[in-house]
Amino acid sequence: MTGTADSAHFMARAMRLAERGLYTTDPNPRVGCVLVREGRIVGEGWHRRAGEPHAERIALAAAGEAARGATAYVTLEPCAHHGRTPPCATGLVEAGVARVVAAMNDPNPRVAGQGVAILREAGVATSVGLLAAEAERLNPGFLKRMRTGLPYVRCKLAMSLDGRTAMDSGESKWITGEAARADVQRLRARSSAVVTGINTVLTDDPSLNVRLNGDDEGDTRQPLRVVLDTRLRMPPRAHMLRLAGATLVVCGEHASEEAEAELRVAGADVQRLPQLGGRIDLQRLLLALAAREVNEVLIESGAVLAGAMLAAGLVDELIVYQAPHLLGDAARGLVRLPGLERLDDRLRFVFVDARRVGDDMRLTLRPEPRQALV
Ligand code: AOF
Ligand code: ZN
């Protein structure tokens, strides 16, 4: 019989396996599975990409006959639906697995509880909840989208020790160092979409793509690049339109049709969305992205868009890189929050992590339970 400590150990192993899909499973969740018989691992698997076998199928194939009578540790409830692949719950039953330990239920309405129901009906002892908090952390975007219809939003910012981003003249370039930039590449790589504003495009002509140095370079999944551009000022010659991966330009309902046609010829997708106070309605933007199966969004923008996202209470996580430099109080501030006039209106966060990345600091924060400026 396997004790609680052993169970946690095997589930932790399943989570390490799931993490291998961090950059590739999108829009599917990262899932890992470990099959254990008589205290020994007889098969392992993790989901690599949508359309390919789920974690359980890979583990079952690896175990073969040894799966009979085994316990399956899975980081997410086995699926119950015929999607791109046949249901895993049925696969586990057919392989003769005796027990299934799932870290959490799958909130996907096509699964939600039904995977567990299939297992129980077939007489497979099934429990849910082991290391549930850790399992949540594997898939913040997929889980939030399934539960609320909105993606999980990270806002990345870079600033000096005194919270400044650029000189008053606009002169900026990179404030943070090499290691922080490499860290941003990993943030991009795990994201379904990277969002910026047209002003950033006009000023910096950024690539917003993923350039991970590793063995799988040619194989890297590129997040959808999203440019918020109410009046379609995006130049058809923008650098990002020449790169691998898709670019979506989001504009207001009255933007020029000619500009839209030109951008489409240049390879961009264009979507019109309603405006709110002269700017694209950010809530509608996030809903539109979720409708495209976007799980994790990375906002990489200037002070205006970042401020608007924060003020609207749409940011789930703030990631701030802080360089050990002083720019002085004439330099530009981190975020524009025009509605903020009284101290009582300040936006509050809690630190969830603080660590050094090369010569810089990386601060990770979450908003204090909901308070929006507007
Ligand atoms: C599992 N194991 O490894 C994963 C699951 O389109 P499909 O067929 O790949 O199904 C995708 C859905 O299956 C996804 O939305 C999620 O609910 C579940 N993912 N389930 O049992 C896995 N990746
Ligand atoms: Zn499955």
Image (cartoon, grey):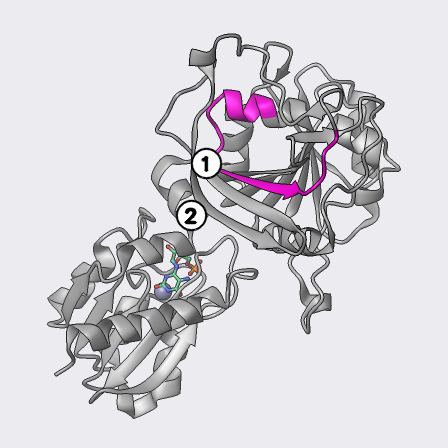
Image quadrant where one finds the N terminus: bottom left
Which is nearer the eye, 213 or 53? Answer: 213
- Residue 157 placement: quadrant: top right
Residue underneath mark 1: 316
The amino acid at mark 1 is Asp
Please say whether residue 320 is visible from this viewpoint: yes
Which residue range is magenta in the image?
307-327
Which is nearer the eye, 139 or 256? Answer: 139
Ligand 1 within 8 A of label 1's CB?
no
- Residue 77 is inside the magenta segment: no
The amino acid at mark 2 is Pro
Residue underneath mark 2: 140
Q: Is residue 329 above or below residue 241?
A: above
The location of residue 348, given as percent across then percent down, is 43, 26
> In the rendering, which numbered label is found on residue 301?
none
Judged left or right of residue 304, residue 31 is left
- Which quarter of the rendered image does ligand 1 occupy? bottom left
Q: Is residue 255 above or below residue 35?
A: above
Cα gap from disc 2 to disc 1, whole angstroms: 10 Å
Which is nearer the eye, 189 or 226? Answer: 189
Q: Secondary structure at mark 2?
A: helix
The location of residue 103, given as percent across then percent down, is 27, 61
Ligand 1 within 8 A of label 2's CB?
no
Judged left or right of residue 62, residue 166 is right
- Residue 320 is inside the magenta segment: yes
**Are the residues flagged by discs 2 and 1 in contact, CB closer than 8 Å?**
yes
